[in-house]
Structures are given as C-alpha cells and as structure tokens.
Image: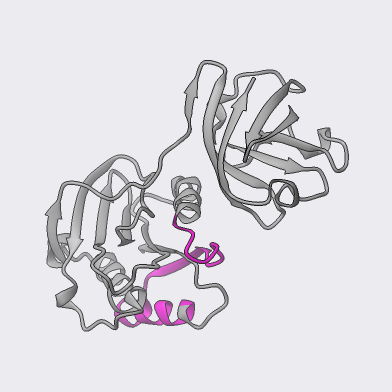
Amino acid sequence: MKLIALLTDFGNSEYVGIVKGVIYSINPNVTIVDITHNVDKFNIKQAAMVLYSSYKYFPKGTIFVCVVDPGVGTERRGVIIKTKDYYFIGPDNGIFSLVEDIDRVIEIDSSLFKASHTFHARDIFAPIAAYISKGACLLDFGNEVKDITRIFGLAKKDRNKIYGEIIYFDDFGNAITNIPASYLNIEYGRRVKLFKDNNLYEIRYVKTYGYANEGELVCLIGSNDFLEISVNKGSAKKILKDIGKIIIEF
C-alpha cells in the first residue's frame, strides 16, 4: 500500500479535502497523511524546512505532494523529483531546496492536464501522485531535466561564527533557524551572542526549555535537530519580531 503525504499552506480550507478526493478517486487504496496545512501563507522557505525536517521519518516509497505556490499559473515549472527513497511533487519554486540524494527530476508537461490557473494542487500534482502510487512511469508526465530551483541552504559556519537565518516562528513563538545541531559544539549553559537587525542579544545555550528562567531568551536544539531561539513560557517572536538573517557568535 502506497503512502502519500501532503504539505501545504491551505489551512482549514476546503482545498485540502478536494486534493484528497482527487487522489482517492484515482487510487482508493492509497493512504494519505497530512504533514501540515498550516505553513504560513506563501512562506516557501518554511515549507522547505518543514519538509526537510519531516520526510526522513516516513517509510521508503512515500510520495510527498508539497504545495506552497504563490506563482501558481505563471511560467514556474512543476516537477517530480525521485530520490533514493522518496518522490516529491510540486512547484519548482524552492520548496524542494533542501531535498537530498536526487536521482531524477521530471519537468511536468502541464498541457497533459485540464488545469485551472489557480489550483494546480488539485488539477496536476494530486493526480500525478495518485497515478505514481499505482505504478505509473515518471516520463508519462514530462521530460527529464538536470536541476531544480534552490532558493536557500543550510547556514554557513566560519570558525566561531555562524551565519544563518530565522526561517519561521512556530505556534509557540519559537524561532526556527537553518542552523544544524552539529554547528553548536559547545557546552550547555554557555552564553552566545545573537546578532539580528543591528541588535545584540547575549543568550544562554541550554539543553531544553526547563533549564531557562521563565521569560528568558535562550537558544537550544529543537526536535528537528536545528537551532531554535526560544523563551521559556513565552514567545521569542515578541522579542525578535520578524524572520531574517542572524549571526551566532560563541
């Protein structure tokens, strides 16, 4: 039995159910899992980070339909990506920036589908996922190309400085960055310098939220193995305000 996983910014709209209905109409025996439909509207980088942090936990052969698509209906490509273990389907707008071990990339021929200008998740990506789950050949949907669009990557480390980015704030107000855990090879309790928007914050690197004082701004490694900036029983978003570039110095 094939598994299709969905990741979108559709929220609580009917669009989620419609996409599932299309898939089930083609393959009623498939299993559909929702990763999330609450990506911030149009935040492609957030979707890319959520996907990167999620897909390795799924069984081999899972088909991921990922749609955060502010360019829907324009000349942006749609793609099918085959990696060593998975398939990814969606717009080629950077949402797959962090996908690794790519074997093949197919540029989707949209002329094969009777598609609206504004709902390619329903009219193109969902049907392709369903047909692939039934064993369709990838080349049935387009031609092979050599690359995909990558709009960002992991943070850069230069000795005692890390040049990274806050990609999004989660529902608790934690600032999720693109800084891998391996970059922070320092002891817990050590103070580091956080530079953002010409502001300097001296914060502690802690093991988990409970080791911070209530209301204290700290940094730690989250469950996705990336650095996050948090406030114990509070919101880092209220302090840091917006996503954007940061520097960590230790």
The quadrant in which residue 89 appears is: bottom left
- Determine the image quadrant of residue 229: top right
- Whether residue 213 sits left or right of residue 197 in the image: it is right
Q: In this view, does 228 lie to the left or right of 101?
A: right
Give the residue displayed 21% in from the left and 84% down from the top: 114
**Quarter that holds the N terminus:** bottom left
Q: Which of 142 and 45 is in front in this view?
A: 45
Identify which residue is drawn at 61% across, 28% down: 248
Q: What are the residue bounds of the magenta stretch?
A: 16-44
The image position of residue 100, as x and y in percent, is: 34, 41
31 is within the stretch colored magenta: yes
Horizontal arrangement in the rendering, residue 62 relative to residue 182 (left or right): left
Residue 206 in sight: no
Rendered residue at 43%/82% (across/down): 18
Of residue 199 and residue 8, the one placed in the foreground of this image is 199
124 relative to 184 in the view: left or right: left
What sort of colour scheme is used for the picture?
one colour
- Residue 113 in magenta stretch: no
Asked if residue 91 is positioned above or below residue 198 in the image, the reply reads below
Q: Report whether residue 65 is seen.
A: yes
Work out whether 135 lies above or below 58.
below
**Residue 161 spot, x, y in % from top left:** 56, 22
In-front residue for pair 71/132: 71
Q: Residue at x 39, y 44 (%)?
A: 98
Q: Name the image quarter holding the C terminus.
A: top right
